[in-house]
Amino acid sequence: MLKGIPSILSPELLKILMEMGHGDTIVIGDGNFPAASLAPEGRLVRLDGHGVPEVLDAILRLFPLDSYVEAPVSLMEVVPGDPVETPIWDTYAGIVERRAPGTKIGHVERFKFYDTAKRAYAIVATGETALYANIILQKGVVVE
């Protein structure tokens, strides 16, 4: 145990967050996201008993977002015609604003999101039940 580190962040996930460099991305996937088939070898972290909001909040307590891109946070767009509501996106916006004020959140077409996820440094699989609850974070630099 360490002081100041959210307990939801496992040693494996902390190691991954530390290894990541500027511009690297990490995906936090909902329970329906094909995390195991898309994750790079050895970089799938399972947090099945947790939802995306609590994982996102814990990561953003430690993780700098990339200030050199327009939207360092990306959500999977709803497929046109899909009648799904996405209230969880408002929750994400609140977390991002609290942890990284002024950060823009972008939207990525579903299959482009999957392609981007294949190139991510790591994927975190959660037990989130909300639909279209997948999110990509792009790492920035720590400025002291």
Image (spheres, rainbow, N blue to C red):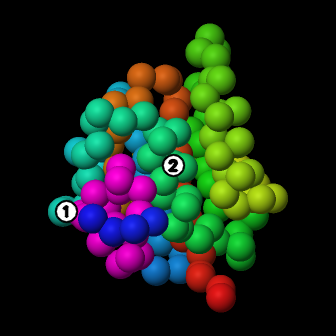
Q: Residue at x 42, y 56 (%)?
A: 6
Figure label count: 2
Is label 2 in a helix, a strand or a loop? helix
Residue at mark 2: 56
- Residue 66 position, x and y percent, is 64, 71
**Residue lying farthest to the left in this orientation:** 42
Is label 1 in a helix, a strand or a loop? loop
Q: Earlier in the sequence, mark 1 or mark 2?
A: 1
Q: Is residue 8 magenta?
A: yes
Q: Quadrant of the N terminus?
A: bottom left
Q: Residue at x 48, y 53 (%)?
A: 58
Residue at mark 1: 41
- Residue 21 position, x and y percent, is 46, 80
Q: Is residue 137 magenta?
A: no
**Distance in Å between CA atoms under marks 1 and 2:** 22 Å
Q: Is residue 49 left or right of residue 105?
A: left
Q: Is residue 134 left or right of residue 81?
A: left
Q: Amino acid at mark 1?
A: Glu
**Residue lying farthest to the right in this orientation:** 102
Q: Residue at x 59, y 71 (%)?
A: 64
- Residue 128 position, x and y percent, is 41, 29
Q: Amino acid at mark 2?
A: Leu
Q: Is residue 56 in view from this perspective? A: yes
Part of the protein shown in magenta = 5-20
Q: Is residue 119 in view from this perspective? A: no
Q: Is residue 16 left or right of residue 25?
A: left
**Quadrant position of residue 23:** bottom right
Q: Tell me the crowding category of disc 1: few under 14, some 14 to 19, or many 20 or more residues within 10 angstroms, Cα based.
A: few
